[in-house]
Image (spheres, helix red, strand yellow):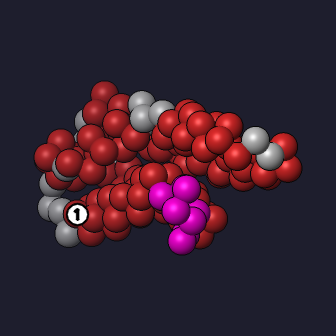
């Protein structure tokens, strides 16, 4: 696989992560109960931007990728269980209210958040698989 194709694939994978993270970001923006999910989306967008700059200005793609903290971030993000933490937090809050309508609404919000977050994680998995492919084939 040539370096040009790898850069193109990396940029495409990063763009996919950026779009998914932006979707999560917009959905969770200014919602204090979804702050943790929102923070992950912000970190993902920042990591994408930093990686794209590194890739664009790198004379040695392999060395840049090997030294990048953002690659580690994308590897770690898939192991975080942010949605389960959110579900537990919401459940504990709704039990105190004892309001079935509020509980149903919050459950729906969590489900919608999870749906959007799963796309971000899927795109991140795809990126991580590409990184493994690149490291196995080298440049």
Q: Which residue is mark 1?
A: 54
Q: Is residue 91 magenta?
A: no
Q: Position of residue 107 (x, y in %)?
A: 74, 44
Q: What is the span of residues highlighted in magenta in the rendered image?
A: 28-35
Quadrant containing the N terminus in the rendered view: top left
Query: Exactly how many numbered labels are in the figure?
Result: 1
Q: Is residue 34 magenta?
A: yes
9 relative to 105 in the view: left or right: left
Q: Residues within 10 Å of mark 1 (few under 14, many from 20)?
A: some
Above or below for 59 versus 93: below
Instruction: Please identify the quarter of the rendering in which residue 79 is found.
Output: top left
- The dominant secondary structure in magenta is helix
111 relative to 68 in the view: left or right: right
Above or below for 108 versus 58: above
Q: Position of residue 44 (x, y in %)?
A: 40, 56
Q: Nearer the viewer, residue 51 or 37?
A: 37
Q: Is residue 16 visible?
A: no
Q: Is residue 138 visible?
A: yes
State the residue at coordinates (85%, 50%): 101
State the residue at coordinates (38%, 50%): 6
Q: Position of residue 93 (x, y in %)?
A: 61, 44
64 relative to 53 in the view: left or right: left
Quadrant containing the C terminus in the rendered view: top left
Instruction: Please identify the quarter of the rendering in which residue 129 is found.
Output: top left
């Amino acid at each position: 696989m040539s370096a040009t194709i790898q850069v193109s694939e990396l940029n495409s994978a990063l763009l996919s992560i950026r779009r998914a993270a932006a979707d999560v970001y917009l959905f969770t923006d200014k919602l204090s109960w979804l702050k943790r999910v929102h923070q992950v989306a912000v970190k993902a967008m920042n990591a994408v931007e930093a990686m794209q700059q590194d890739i664009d200005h790198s004379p040695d793609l392999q060395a840049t990728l090997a030294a990048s903290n953002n690659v580690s971030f994308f590897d770690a993000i898939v192991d975080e269980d942010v949605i389960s933490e959110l579900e537990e937090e919401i459940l504990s809050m709704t039990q105190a209210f004892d309001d079935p309508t509020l509980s149903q609404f919050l459950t729906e919000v969590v489900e919608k958040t999870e749906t959007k977050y799963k796309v971000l994680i899927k795109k991140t998995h795809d990126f991580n698989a590409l990184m493994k492919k690149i490291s196995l084939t080298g440049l």
